[in-house]
């Protein structure tokens, strides 16, 4: 029997990634429902079945899908501030959950969801699809083959040139807004997969364009420090960059320096653009996930100790495959297979995210706590804590759970909690009015690349 899935949120993440991936992997999955406060225009123009599948139904509220006995998996592709509450509701309703990145606003929220998933014996999985980018797969292969030697310097970029505002919710001063929350978790996850838990973090997160809310970041540099150990005598520095005023084409993606060679790579993975252009039919293309030769990386290898004999070769990029994440997810749900993206890795990504924000705020390098160091307490999910976190005055109205119902009025106080301010004021447990306001903002201002 196929895994019956429901996708919550029909922005770029939902429509541009999850819907095509699910539809392309029948009979492993069936897309049973799509959920959003705003009905997709395809319902009106008669193209809904063509885009979302013939058996797919549209629902307007999260509650409506939670009670469906024919739903096995809920994919949360809504604004980041709603992730915790929606995922918690889904897990407590007995559903498996796939969470788009960043999985939550805070480390404590990620920890709390992990506890709930274990208690409910449900699968909780992070959508770190960029582990299956063509260039990243190629880099990993070079590392496994030892062709770079001991890696001393790892530089990973996701730069663009955009000297204007798109009107996305990610450009708003809300929890989970800003360039760092949007792209940082991908780059952090990739670095952690290569090198593991760092020893220290230094970060610079800022607004460089001077457009929009000055508290919302559009530029970040995060440096992960790996100190020598008994088994690894060399240091490694991983620099992660996201810059919105980078005027070059193609953009730099990787420069990785080792004791034997340097790997340089320009240009981005092709899968996102192919899916957004062709939907699930993109997977029928012979060139799906295939990078053009002009974007293949270069490996420069030293053949003498003085660097006089350095030979360059073009390294063909491995075909990218986001489908592998969903295939693994199906195996985890059906057979209990080992998850390719472990939830503990998602938690670590959120910890590093928070430490980077702390480093930038305090203008200092911060130490990553060891595994034996006590972690943050799980978030409290009650109305009093919600109002304390949001600084919303108590009006006497009681919360009845999560909701995706639409509303045009913002909650009485929307906190300014973008990347430039404290991560601890998270949207741990959104009330119905706040959840609905964020989703209303979401469907009016569709987001960008996931």
Image (cartoon, rainbow, N blue to C red):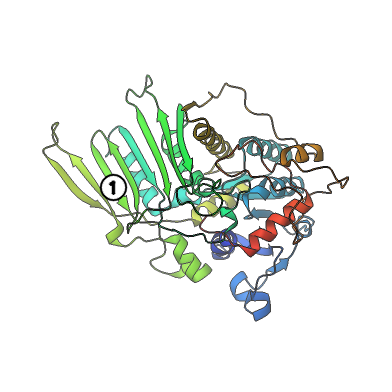
Check the picture and name the quadrant holding the N terminus.
bottom right
When the figure is inspected, residue 89 is found, relative to residue 349, above or below; the finding is below
Is any part of residue 417 visible from this angle? yes
Q: Nearer the viewer, residue 114 or 361?
A: 361
Q: Position of residue 329 (x, y in %)?
A: 58, 50
Direction right: furthest residue: 396
Along the viewing direction, whichever of 218 and 198 lies nearer the viewer: 218
Label 1 sits on residue: 264
Relative depth, front residue between 118 and 354: 354
Residue at 46%, 31% (x, y): give it.
201
The picture places residue 346, in percent across and down from the top left corner, at 56, 40
Picture coordinates of residue 339, whole percent (x, y)? 55, 43
Left or right side of 385 for 227: left
Residue 441 locus on image (x, y percent): 66, 59
Picture layout, residue 241 above or below residue 364: below
Whether residue 341 is situated above or below residue 272 in the rendered picture: above
In the displayed structure image, the side of residue 310 where residue 425 appears, left or right = right
Q: In screen coordinates, is 352 left or right of 173?
A: left
254 to 35, vertically: above or below = above
| Residue at image point 69% right, 33% down | 378
User: Judging from the image, what secondary structure is the residue with disc 1 in?
Assistant: strand
Q: Is residue 1 visible?
A: no
Mark 1, other Cα within 10 Å: few <14 / some 14–19 / many ≥20: some
Q: Residue furthest left?
A: 308
For the residue pair 19 and 439, the one nearer the viewer reads as 439
Q: Residue furthest top?
A: 230
Q: Name which quarter of the figure residue 308 lies in.
A: top left
Q: Is residue 1 left or right of residue 154?
A: right
Count how many numbered circles sit on residues in the image. 1
């Amino acid at each position: 029997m196929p895994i019956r899935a429901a996708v919550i949120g029909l922005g770029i993440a939902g429509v541009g990634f999850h819907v095509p991936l699910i539809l392309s992997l029948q009979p492993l999955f069936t897309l049973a429902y799509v959920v959003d406060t705003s009905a997709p225009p395809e319902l009106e123009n008669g193209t809904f079945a063509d885009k979302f599948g013939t058996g797919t139904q549209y629902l307007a509220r999260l509650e409506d899908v939670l009670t469906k006995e024919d739903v096995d998996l809920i994919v949360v592709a809504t604004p980041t501030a709603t992730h915790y509450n929606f995922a918690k509701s889904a897990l407590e309703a007995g559903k498996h959950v796939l969470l788009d990145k960043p999985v939550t606003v805070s480390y404590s929220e990620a920890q709390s969801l992990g506890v709930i998933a274990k208690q409910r014996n449900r699968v909780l999985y992070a959508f770190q699809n960029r582990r299956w980018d063509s260039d990243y797969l190629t880099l990993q292969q070079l590392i496994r083959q030892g062709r770079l030697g001991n890696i001393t310097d790892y530089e990973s970029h996701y730069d663009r040139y955009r000297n204007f505002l798109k009107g996305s919710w990610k450009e708003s001063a809300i929890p989970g807004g800003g360039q760092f929350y949007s792209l940082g978790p991908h780059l952090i996850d990739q670095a952690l997969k290569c090198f593991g838990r760092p020893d220290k973090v230094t970060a610079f997160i800022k607004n460089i364009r001077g457009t929009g809310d000055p508290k919302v970041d559009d530029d970040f540099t995060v440096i992960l420090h790996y100190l020598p150990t008994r088994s690894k005598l060399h240091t490694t520095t991983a620099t992660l960059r996201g810059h919105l005023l980078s005027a070059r084409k193609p953009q730099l993606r990787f420069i990785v320096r080792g004791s034997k060679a340097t790997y340089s790579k320009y240009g981005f993975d092709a899968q996102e653009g192919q899916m957004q252009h062709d939907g699930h039919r993109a997977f029928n293309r012979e060139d799906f996930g295939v990078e053009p030769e002009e974007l293949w990386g270069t490996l420069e290898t030293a053949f003498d100790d003085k660097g006089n004999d350095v030979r360059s070769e073009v390294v063909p990029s491995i075909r990218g495959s986001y489908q592998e994440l969903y295939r693994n997810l199906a195996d985890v749900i059906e057979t209990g297979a080992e998850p390719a993206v472990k939830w503990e890795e998602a938690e670590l990504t959120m910890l590093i995210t928070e430490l980077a924000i702390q480093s930038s705020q305090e203008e200092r390098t911060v130490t990553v706590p060891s595994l034996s160091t006590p972690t943050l307490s799980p978030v409290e999910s009650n109305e009093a804590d919600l109002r304390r976190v949001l600084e919303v005055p108590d009006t006497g109205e009681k919360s009845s759970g999560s909701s995706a119902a639409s509303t045009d009025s913002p909650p009485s106080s929307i906190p300014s909690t973008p990347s430039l301010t404290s991560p601890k004021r998270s949207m741990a447990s959104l009330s119905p009015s706040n959840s609905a306001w964020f989703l209303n903002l979401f469907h009016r201002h569709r987001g960008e690349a996931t």
